[in-house]
Image (cartoon, rainbow, N blue to C red):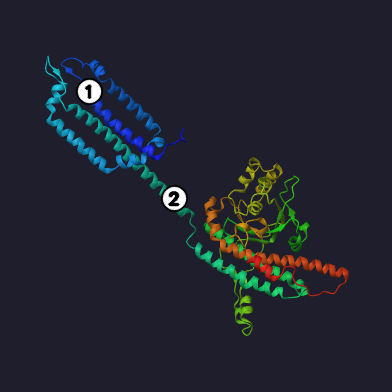
């Protein structure tokens, strides 16, 4: 088992220096003891005198071996391995050991007769080591030890370099794999420019004109303005879905078995029914994923199929520039002419999407219990104000019960995603025009949630890093879309107010009067920008 303790760096250095110094002295003392051994022709060497005269040397040798065993087992904790690598793994150390071995060889060759007289004495003679031979033996042992340690450190360093090289190659392969296609930056820049023009040149201009009109005209024209804004929103959703498919290198169009979709869920406070009233009657919307406990949602996400798209082609453009509009009305106002010629393509809404309302549980206390009440995907994205990545909706739904979610919610999730062929993998992006401010990361500041999903699992190659990069790349698009949605919501709420006022006036038989918008233009502009 790996040890968690460790000593200071200075103490590690001291232990390493002591260990090698002690080994050096031990080798010399052991060689000196062995030098006192005598050899007699035809007899075994007498080792009894060796034990009697060199007990201390032998004990120190035993201590050295035990020290090496202990220091090797816990080398990462008590030894300065980096310093040892620099010294023993250095190429100069190998050359130095080679020169010592050469010097020992020369000396042994010169004094070979003395070695023979010691190891192989003549008959009736006693072989004794001459002065200096014991030192030679000690340096032979030290040189052998040095070569072993040098080779070990060189081999370890080579393995470490190979490992680092392999990790670098793997990281390079991963970077190449995660990188978007070569044409992705061009499409991203194009869509960012177009969506910014949608926000400023089209939606903001129409919104400004709308503010100047009296109440009766606004009531008559608000639905036309809302539908015009929905066309822009659908075009923006197509852009985001196409970028997601392009990031995946997925073929898009009628001939592909991959179908990318996107939708927008509008955020509304549970106690404020204005936005829902402007979209239609509540009976037209299905309430999904009720948790079956006594808890009241703080917010709701409204899914209206008019804010959904199916990507059926890989075309780049999302604008419709008509030559007739461009060349007519040459005497009219230039700004109005430009606005008329710059239109969003008319993308149809996705007929397979059904209107629905999703509860979102959240409180200022940020109770973690509420996290187990929210469905995965868009509700989680709104409650956390963070993008959500679900590469396999069925697998994630089956894990809910094990992760502490309520049993009714987990059961509904499994049933829904198992039967939903459109969304086998989903990503959800909370949309706000103020995401650069930390205090704005609250559900009340989010105008909606954009869902991008496909009918096969592993969107963005099933890699969350890919999705994280996509979120960063498309941030300018998200901000432009947030401004468009903010103005759209303002018109929705104004429509609800106008309808309510018209009903009251009709019941009281009061003639209509010009009435300013409930939220004045400057206030809305401040909130959007």
Q: Which mark is residue 521?
A: none
Q: Position of residue 243 (x, y in %)?
A: 55, 61
116 left or right of 284 in image: left
Q: Quadrant of residue 49?
A: top left
Label total for image: 2
Residue at 44% in and 50% down: 171
On the question of residue 199 being in view, the answer is yes
Residue linked to disc 2? 171
| Neighbour tally class for label 1: few under 14, some 14-19, many 20 plus, Cα within 10 Å | some
Secondary structure found at label 1:
helix
Residue at 60% in and 65% down: 480
Q: Position of residue 241 (x, y in %)?
A: 59, 60
514 left or right of 472 in image: right
Secondary structure found at label 2:
helix
Q: Residue furthest right?
A: 508
On the question of residue 251 being in view, the answer is no
In the rendered view of the protein, which quadrant contains the C terminus?
A: bottom right
- Which sits in the foreground, 417 or 401? 401
Q: Quadrant of residue 369?
A: top right
Residue at 28% in and 22% down: 56
Residue linked to disc 1? 34
525 left or right of 190 in image: right
Q: Earlier in the sequence, mark 2 or mark 1?
A: 1
């Amino acid at each position: 088992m790996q040890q968690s303790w460790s000593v200071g760096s200075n103490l590690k250095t001291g232990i390493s220096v002591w260990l090698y110094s002690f080994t050096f002295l031990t080798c010399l003392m052991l060689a000196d003891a062995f030098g006192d051994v005598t050899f007699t022709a035809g007899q075994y060497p007498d080792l009894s005198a060796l034990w009697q005269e060199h007990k201390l040397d032998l004990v120190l040798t035993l201590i050295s071996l035990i020290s090496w065993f202990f220091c090797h087992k816990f080398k990462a904790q008590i030894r300065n391995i980096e310093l040892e690598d620099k010294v023993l793994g250095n190429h100069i150390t190998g050359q130095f050991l080679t020169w010592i071995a050469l010097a020992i060889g020369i000396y042994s060759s010169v004094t070979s007769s003395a070695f023979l007289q010691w190891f192989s004495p003549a008959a009736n003679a006693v072989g004794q080591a001459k002065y200096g031979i014991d030192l030679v033996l000690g340096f032979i042992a030290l040189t052998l030890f040095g070569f072993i340690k040098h080779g070990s450190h060189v081999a370890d360093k080579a393995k470490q370099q190979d490992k680092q090289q392999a990790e670098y190659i793997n990281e390079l392969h991963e970077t190449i794999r995660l990188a978007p296609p070569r044409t992705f930056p061009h499409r991203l820049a194009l869509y960012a420019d177009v969506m910014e023009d949608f926000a400023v040149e089209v939606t903001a201009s129409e919104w400004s004109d709308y503010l100047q009109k009296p109440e009766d005209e606004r009531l008559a024209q608000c639905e036309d303005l809302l539908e015009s804004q929905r066309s822009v929103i659908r075009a923006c959703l197509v852009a985001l879905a196409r970028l997601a498919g392009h990031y995946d290198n997925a073929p898009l169009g009628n001939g592909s078995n991959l179908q990318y979709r996107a939708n927008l869920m509008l955020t509304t406070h549970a106690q404020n029914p204005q936005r829902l009233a402007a979209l239609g009657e509540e009976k037209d919307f299905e309430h999904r994923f009720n948790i079956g406990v006594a808890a009241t949602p703080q917010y709701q996400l409204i899914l209206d199929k008019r804010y959904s798209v199916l990507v059926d082609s890989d075309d780049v453009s999302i604008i419709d520039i008509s030559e007739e509009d461009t060349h007519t009305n040459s005497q009219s106002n230039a700004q109005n002419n430009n606005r008329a010629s710059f239109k969003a393509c008319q993308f149809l809404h996705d007929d397979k999407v059904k209107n629905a309302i999703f509860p979102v549980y959240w409180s200022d206390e940020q109770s973690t219990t509420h996290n187990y009440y929210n469905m995965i995907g868009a509700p989680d994205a709104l409650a956390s104000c963070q993008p959500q990545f679900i590469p396999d909706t069925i697998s994630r739904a089956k894990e809910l019960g094990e992760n502490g979610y309520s049993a009714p919610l987990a059961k509904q999730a499994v049933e829904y995603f198992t039967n939903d062929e459109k969304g086998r993998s989903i990503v959800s992006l909370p949309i706000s025009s103020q995401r650069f401010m930390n205090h704005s990361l609250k559900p009340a500041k989010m105008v909606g949630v954009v869902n991008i999903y496909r009918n096969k699992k592993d969107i963005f190659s099933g890699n969350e890093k890919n999705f994280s990069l996509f979120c960063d790349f498309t941030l300018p698009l998200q901000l432009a879309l947030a401004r468009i949605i903010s103005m759209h919501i303002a018109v929705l709420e104004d429509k609800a107010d106008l309808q309510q006022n018209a009903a009251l006036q009709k019941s009281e038989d009061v003639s209509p009067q010009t009435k300013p918008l409930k939220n004045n233009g400057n206030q809305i502009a401040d909130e959007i920008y």
